[in-house]
Image: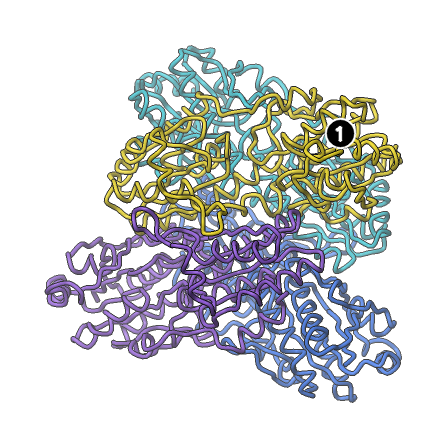
Chain colours: A blue, B purple, C cyan, D yellow
Amino acid sequence: MRIGILTGGGDCPGLNAVIRAVVRKGIGEHGDEIVGFRDGWRGVLESDTVPMDLGSVRGILPRGGTVLGTSRTNPYAVEGGPERVLATVERLGIEALIPIGGEDTLGVATRLAGAGVRVVGVPKTIDNDLDSTDYTFGFDTAVGVAMEAIDRLHTTGDSHHRTLVVEVMGRHAGWIALHAGMAGGANVVLIPEKPFDVDGVVAHCLHRFGSGYSPIVVVSEGAKPKDGDLMLSTGERDAFGHVRLGGIGAALASLIEERTGREARAVVLGHIQRGGTPSPFDRVLATRFGLAAVDAVHDGQSGVMVALRGTDIVRVPLSAATAQLKLVPPERYAEAEVFFG
Amino acid sequence: MRIGILTGGGDCPGLNAVIRAVVRKGIGEHGDEIVGFRDGWRGVLESDTVPMDLGSVRGILPRGGTVLGTSRTNPYAVEGGPERVLATVERLGIEALIPIGGEDTLGVATRLAGAGVRVVGVPKTIDNDLDSTDYTFGFDTAVGVAMEAIDRLHTTGDSHHRTLVVEVMGRHAGWIALHAGMAGGANVVLIPEKPFDVDGVVAHCLHRFGSGYSPIVVVSEGAKPKDGDLMLSTGERDAFGHVRLGGIGAALASLIEERTGREARAVVLGHIQRGGTPSPFDRVLATRFGLAAVDAVHDGQSGVMVALRGTDIVRVPLSAATAQLKLVPPERYAEAEVFFG
Amino acid sequence: MRIGILTGGGDCPGLNAVIRAVVRKGIGEHGDEIVGFRDGWRGVLESDTVPMDLGSVRGILPRGGTVLGTSRTNPYAVEGGPERVLATVERLGIEALIPIGGEDTLGVATRLAGAGVRVVGVPKTIDNDLDSTDYTFGFDTAVGVAMEAIDRLHTTGDSHHRTLVVEVMGRHAGWIALHAGMAGGANVVLIPEKPFDVDGVVAHCLHRFGSGYSPIVVVSEGAKPKDGDLMLSTGERDAFGHVRLGGIGAALASLIEERTGREARAVVLGHIQRGGTPSPFDRVLATRFGLAAVDAVHDGQSGVMVALRGTDIVRVPLSAATAQLKLVPPERYAEAEVFFG
Amino acid sequence: MRIGILTGGGDCPGLNAVIRAVVRKGIGEHGDEIVGFRDGWRGVLESDTVPMDLGSVRGILPRGGTVLGTSRTNPYAVEGGPERVLATVERLGIEALIPIGGEDTLGVATRLAGAGVRVVGVPKTIDNDLDSTDYTFGFDTAVGVAMEAIDRLHTTGDSHHRTLVVEVMGRHAGWIALHAGMAGGANVVLIPEKPFDVDGVVAHCLHRFGSGYSPIVVVSEGAKPKDGDLMLSTGERDAFGHVRLGGIGAALASLIEERTGREARAVVLGHIQRGGTPSPFDRVLATRFGLAAVDAVHDGQSGVMVALRGTDIVRVPLSAATAQLKLVPPERYAEAEVFFG
């Protein structure tokens, strides 16, 4: 078979592991031909392809990012986009597409499947907020980067008797903050799912100082205080209109410093969370996703996505996967709260 | 409540995270008293205890090993052992026991539960071979140590055009070899579940050399060749009768060198796989196990073990957990085989 | 002898290794008594002490920060400060002081030595800008943290075809940027010693994009553009008057985005550079500094500082050490420039 | 100029950084042509070359090993070898050679320089035992791998109350054991330079157990007991005549277990010490060596080797570099002894 593969949206450790698995299994076991599209749907729109052979994927397993490149191009947002995509698929003789991506990329995939293209999706979101799969690859790596930062910050905080606020990724869901905070021994974890009370945070910080140690506050970039206006007063755009670093983290550190009367500092982990070599968990998960996607294609499936359920890789409808975000449920947040203060 | 806690068997990254979670939740939320027993069941036999308060568990989350110490003492293998254990529990007013351990430790737990002691077990095995739970903590850390070693060995192997054989833990089950091999891009993975054919291994090595790169062979310590006698001819005990390092790994490297006509070297990872700071996955899992064990105790449960199912922590009968080993199923091994050669 | 020890200024990986070495050598070889002062000179001013024995330093070698705490208190900036310091030294029977710190801490040490107190200093600056020593501990660790971040950022930058600007520590000297940039394969390195030309940076970025890869720009927090006013227009203080994150890094990313016409993102590494476990180089150097300081004290030295020259630990006058900053010389910067673009 | 480059002997993290620096500086600044020889002197003997351009060295900085391959081939040990080497150099129009290697490789270089070939050597030895340079690249990385292993082993040793013996590289010189032992907080360090007394080692182990913690013994592979015959009785070759893993480490662990009456285990780090990504220190040092070698070539130098002195890269005669091994001096070993027991 002639199978097209592409990676869309934000990059994520493990993308190359998926690509490698698709190529190794497709070529090695089925004699498939694998066509890589550059930069996500942009490559499909513009017929920008790269032929993938066994040599193309040698050595890429431990590397972050994606050798295919990525973009946020959405063919359905482009004049005549869907038609051009279908034309490319037709002209290149692509018999199946394996798009690897998040909500947006898989949303396109869902519509293409509806339009008759054979599509098997691979879920990707570093935030771990895609429904229908226990975990997505990249998440464990991001949590690891954040946890290592927290491990480092404990000693510097304690030495200086200051609060450290660590801002991590998570615009809508707090999974990275939750796991990194639990793994790093954070004293407060703030997530988008639960608007927080600044005074409550300050109380935990003061309690921690009272024990002779210094607090670590982990906050999702999308976390919001109950008293929302307060934070927005710290303008968040620079002279060029770009969003500035240090939105919620810096603002919160300022408030904590004000109200505890002790120094506070913010650290914004930013892009180091999504770059670099994937963790073992992510390499295995991404590899298994890639293998399972090729299996699904050869089983004649379409409109499905591979997903993790327990230790099994299963197939779920693409539509279900993107129907709603997977948020941190209250009982999981309650686990982290045991360690507050 | 007065709750006893102990860690038995081989140490494992994450034990301290469990202990910390039990103490924080027990004391912080329920006002429990937590009694630590030193060195597993030995501490119970000999009433060797250490009182646990919030200060006892400060800073232990990122540390490997167990602050309680461990041993392989089995009270049922000791004259009058069970009676002494029951007497200790009675005399100290222990209302519930939380033993953290593997097959042996939980086997004792099962019998004590049968004898009327309230027991909630926490599963621990670095080999990931306990049934009834998707994963045990420590496993992900061990896989990570092995994967990092494999990452390192690729470049030295390629530079010298030699085969590198990496022997990892796994006496009865090949989970560490499977995951580390898949994550590290190994060219052959050998596990106890599937006796291997030396000539098949050699063929994969030669194929790899043919591509201009050098092979990495990952082998579980418990893997066995089909032609078993061959390997046993390389005596495995030293002058003092102790088991020597380099059983299967060294023997296999010798055979590969003989039959490929190119240098081969063995690396035995040994104890570095089980020591050191736990991975984020293991810290979160171990913490959740500890919290759930306290919940189970306060829910009046006994004879159960906490376990991971998907993303949930559930309770399963202790007896079921230790009934049989969880082995690598053929379909999982087949996933690794896609990348052989 | 009765020896006082203290750590002042910003914390640094390796401080605990110095403290441990002083205690182990002083107590173990000389039968000294070691008195720890809490939070740098504040502890001396306020007679806030902690007795140090072999148990106090067990397990602290791999830990970042300082078990003694630190502060920026300067007794010479406090009314009656010097008198109180001398009174403390007298009253506690301190025969020698080992202050571990940077310019400020050692400046105080110099004046106390002049006032008759026996003082042997240990140099500490994460920025590596203290004269008279080849390296200071903490620097290698900071470079390592920054290099790992750059390693991670390469793949995410390439995947998205965007520039990544990494802001590292270095207010007056660019050593961290220079070494991390060379080690991480940065395409531009900007340091305080050499005001930069924004258009030159942009040209390097465009050249890099032209090769099919994405640029990494490493910038010291203290680096300044030639056209200085331009940058200052991006206000750097938040609503509470605290310095905001993302000074030069964020401003530069904005300019690069404007002028290359491609996305640019900034990452500010901040405090993770100074926390956490020290690198092997720093642990060995810090340990040797501590041992040598005790030797110097017992040799009757005062007003000196231990220092690294090649592979030897030597003694230099405290005054010389703090006379001027050690800046990156042009020929070292030229080495990095070979790899620009 | 037309410059040949080759890497010989055991591989070492940092080799690729040297190669990259030679290519970037040679081509980028001087318009040189760079010819890579495959597998050390073998490639020169057999005219096995690979043209090196800027693309050849892209992305290789963080990678261990050597993209040129390596071997232990010595042209002076081959019939007609020297003549063939000179003929290759002549025929390919090589105006200067930059061999990167240790004693053997640089010994050949010395003789070729004597025969009129322009040669500038780059020193390489993971053991750090080449004279005339403060450090060689690869050493810091190896120390880091060993230190991380020791960090991990502390917790498992303490949990089980057992001695852990860590065997590290160092056949003739104990630098890796010394630095890794100091950095890892080892309780005994044994090096080839100082034959050890088994009972002395046992006494330190017992003392450590007495403090409630478990001993870590770091031993160079080349360390020897005073009572040498004792150890040799544990045969060190397997059924195929290959040297077995676990020579001194396993033998010593057996003796310690016998004499302390407590379990002891050995870990042999082996090849993971020399593979993998170089540390920041090694990347910077190797890069500077490469740059300096090109400078030396263009300055018309020959028969010299680049070397580190303090923070400077200098040139020393090749002959001096290989005249004698750099061993651990007694005063450096005495530093480690402060922490024994």
Q: Secondary structure at mark 1?
A: helix
Q: Is residue C201 found left or right of C247 in the rendered image?
A: right
Residue C310 picture location, percent across and down: 58, 22
Q: Name the quarter where the C terminus of chain D is drawn.
A: top left
Residue named by callout 1: D293
Query: Of residues C40 and B10, which is closer to you in this image?
Result: B10
- Indicate the amino acid at tag 1: Ala
Look at 62% across and 27% down and name the residue there: C129
Q: Is residue B77 found left or right of A186 in the rendered image?
A: left
Badge 1: residue crowd in 10 Å (few <14, some 14–19, many ≥20): many
Q: Is residue C255 visible?
A: yes
Q: Chain of mark 1?
A: D
**Position of B103 relative to B141 (above/below):** below
Where residue D331 sits, quadrant-wise, is top left
Query: Of residues C49 and D35, which is closer to you in this image?
Result: D35
Q: Name the quarter where the N terminus of chain D is drawn.
A: top right
Q: Is residue D335 found left or right of A108 in the rendered image?
A: left
Residue B159 picture location, percent across and down: 66, 47
